[in-house]
Image (cartoon, rainbow, N blue to C red):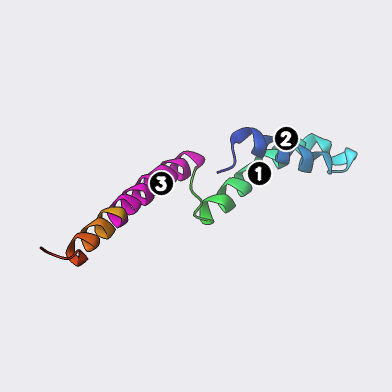
Amino acid sequence: MIDARTLDELARRLAELIPPGASAAGADIADNVKDALRAGLRKLDLVTREEFDVQRCVLLRTREKVEELETRVAQLEQLLQAPRH
């Protein structure tokens, strides 16, 4: 998810676009923009970087295990196909 600093920066930039005469409301508008961005991002059902990294590690471990099992199955298949004396 986007961190608070990124939201603050985006809200600040949007507030700068407000005409000078309406700058008194700039802080309120920036707060409203941040709130709207947070609400919109929550609706996107995004995962945090930490959650993504955890799942990436799980996937890597699973891939390693699958490769080990594939190697073991290949070895067992060779044993079954070997001529018996």
Residue 80 horizontal side relative to residue 67, left or right = left
Mark seen at residue 60:
3
**Residue 59 part of the magenta-drawn span:** yes
62, above or below 83, in the image = above
Instruction: Name the amino acid type tagged 1.
Output: Asn
| Residue on which the image places disc 1 | 32
* Neighbours of disc 1 within 10 Å: few (<14), some (14-19), many (20+): few
Mark seen at residue 27:
2
N-term-proximal mark, 2 vs 3: 2
**Residue 84 part of the magenta-drawn span:** no
Q: Position of residue 38 (x, y in %)?
A: 58, 46
Q: Position of residue 42 (x, y in %)?
A: 52, 51
* Neighbours of disc 2 within 10 Å: few (<14), some (14-19), many (20+): few
The C terminus lies in which quarter of the figure?
A: bottom left
Q: Position of residue 44 (x, y in %)?
A: 54, 56
Highlighted magenta segment, given as a residue range: 49-70
Which image quarter: residue 35? Answer: top right
| Helix, strand or loop: magenta stretch | helix
Residue 66 horizontal side relative to residue 37, left or right = left
Instruction: Name the amino acid type tagged 3.
Output: Leu
The N terminus lies in which quarter of the figure?
A: top right
